């Protein structure tokens, strides 16, 4: 019975991660300690893989949202998006002005 309860909490935890929450928030949301979630991750390779997949989904959702903002003309979103894809590098000169490099 305890194993079934743990699996249910793990599934809820992973769903919370996919929704964009941090591990700490997701743990609190399902009623476990943050350390418990990390212990599960360390002890269970399948859970660890599912955690990584959930975080990848989270990243994809953020990237899609950022892309929509950039298409709408949000310059900050454009810069962040380019940085994420390593197509935008900024350096600062001694006079404090920024130089954009591609």
Image (cartoon, rainbow, N blue to C red):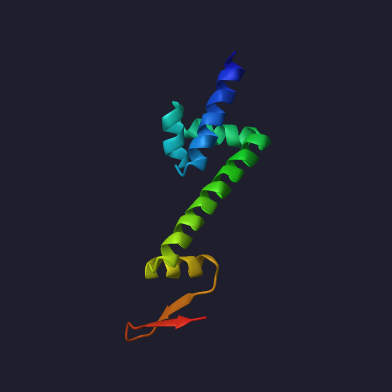
Residue 102 lies, in percent from the top left, at 52, 81
* Rendered view: 44 above or below 49: above
Residue 75 lies, in percent from the top left, at 38, 70
Q: Is residue 26 left or right of residue 54?
A: left
Q: Is residue 20 left or right of residue 4?
A: left
Which residue does the image show at 59% across and 36% down from the upper left?
A: 41
Which residue does the image show at 43% across and 79% down from the upper left?
A: 91
Residue 98 lies, in percent from the top left, at 37, 81
Q: Residue placed farthest to the top in the image?
A: 1
68 or 92: which is nearer to us?
A: 68
85 or 38: which is nearer to us?
A: 85
Residue 1 lies, in percent from the top left, at 60, 13
Q: Residue 99 sits in which quadrant? A: bottom left
The count of marks equals 0
Which residue does the image show at 44% across and 66% down from the upper left?
A: 71
1 or 69: which is nearer to us?
A: 69
Q: Residue placed farthest to the right in the image?
A: 45
Q: Residue placed farthest to the left in the image?
A: 95
* Rendered view: 6 above or below 63: above
Which residue does the image show at 60% across and 45% down from the upper left?
A: 52
* Rendered view: 81 above or below 96: above
């Amino acid at each position: 019975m305890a194993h079934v309860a743990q699996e249910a909490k793990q599934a809820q935890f992973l769903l919370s991660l996919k929704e964009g929450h941090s591990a700490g928030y997701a743990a609190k949301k399902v009623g476990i300690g943050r350390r418990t979630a990390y212990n599960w991750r360390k002890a269970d390779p399948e859970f660890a893989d599912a955690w990584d997949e959930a975080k990848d989904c989270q990243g994809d959702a953020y990237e899609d949202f950022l892309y929509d903002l950039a298409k709408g003309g949000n310059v900050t979103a454009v810069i962040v998006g380019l940085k994420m894809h390593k197509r935008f590098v900024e350096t600062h000169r001694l006079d404090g002005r920024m130089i954009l490099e591609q």
